[in-house]
Image (cartoon, rainbow, N blue to C red):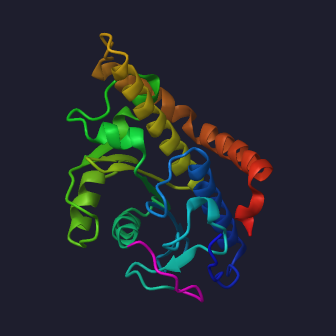
Amino acid sequence: MATVAATKPAETPDEQTLREDLAAAYRLVAHFGWDELIFTHLSVRIPGPDHQFLINPLGLLFEEITASSLVKIDLQGRPVGDNTQPVNPAGFVIHSAVHAAREDAQCVMHLHTVAGTAVAAQRDGLLPLSQNALLGWDDLAYHDYEGLAVETGEKERLVADLGTHNLMILRNHGLLTVGATVADAFVRLFILQRACEMQVAAQAGGADLIHQSDAMGHKVAAQGRAAFAAGAGLSWAALRRKLDRLDPGYRA
């Protein structure tokens, strides 16, 4: 395992909770096979006026991330605290843009999964083929590809495209979700990723596909919103229990 200097201890119990939740999310992404070597990124904002957030250090696999190895940075990408490990520049651009623009987006997750990127490469994007796809029907935005996300000029366009939505497909690139908690962002990511997997599998079958109507999409999305808050919290608690059984080292 790579050796990375730990940060100083979390300054507050709330920060430690966020560190453990975010480290758990990294380990779960690796568990589900959604990671891509040392690249892509998840972040969480630390409550307070300083607009600091936690993100992975560049160089660690997601399966190696621990609560103490997460890097605290400000909106200018400057490290805060003792851990001065570099972070992925694209991670800084994408995540700092969303955190700065959306007070409710405490957690931001961005991945390049195979199924997610496959759907992102399709002209019509996510299709109304599954219940999973319809659950986020009113909450999904798109952002056109502009190359590697390392240019700060893209920030304004990305947040304008995201608007008030919590799900985004970055065309030819990958998936992005946001949430008021790590639990919310992760469960949204799971549902969106599974919808993309279902779409690719359905298309691979070669049969005529049943597309649900836009009206049905709005209906299912409204039904889903009513149950999401409780469902996300219960799902995240179950996932944390699973991780504690299989891979408890994330808490370190």
User: Residue at image x 76%, y 49%?
Assistant: 246
Q: Position of residue 132 (x, y in %)?
A: 46, 29
- Magenta extent: 80-88
* Lateral position of residue 152 relative to residue 7, left or right: left
In the displayed structure, 26 sits above or below 202; it is: below
Q: Position of residue 51 (x, y in %)?
A: 46, 76
Q: Is residue 84 magenta?
A: yes
* Lateral position of residue 171 relative to residue 244, left or right: left
User: Residue at image x 55%, y 72%?
Assistant: 46
Q: How many marks?
A: 0
In the displayed structure, 150 sits above or below 63; it is: below
Magenta segment, prevailing SS (helix, strand or loop): loop
Residue at the extreme bottom of the image, as rendered? 82
Q: Position of residue 119 (x, y in %)?
A: 32, 37
User: Residue at image x 50%, y 47%?
Assistant: 34
Q: Can the viewer see residue 180?
A: yes
**Residue in the foreground of this view, choosing between 213 and 192:** 192
- The part of the image, by quadrant, that contains residue 137 is top left
Q: Quick one: quadrant of the C terminus?
A: bottom right
Q: Quick one: quadrant of the N terminus?
A: bottom right
**Residue in the foreground of this view, choosing between 128 and 86:** 86
Q: Can the viewer see residue 221?
A: no
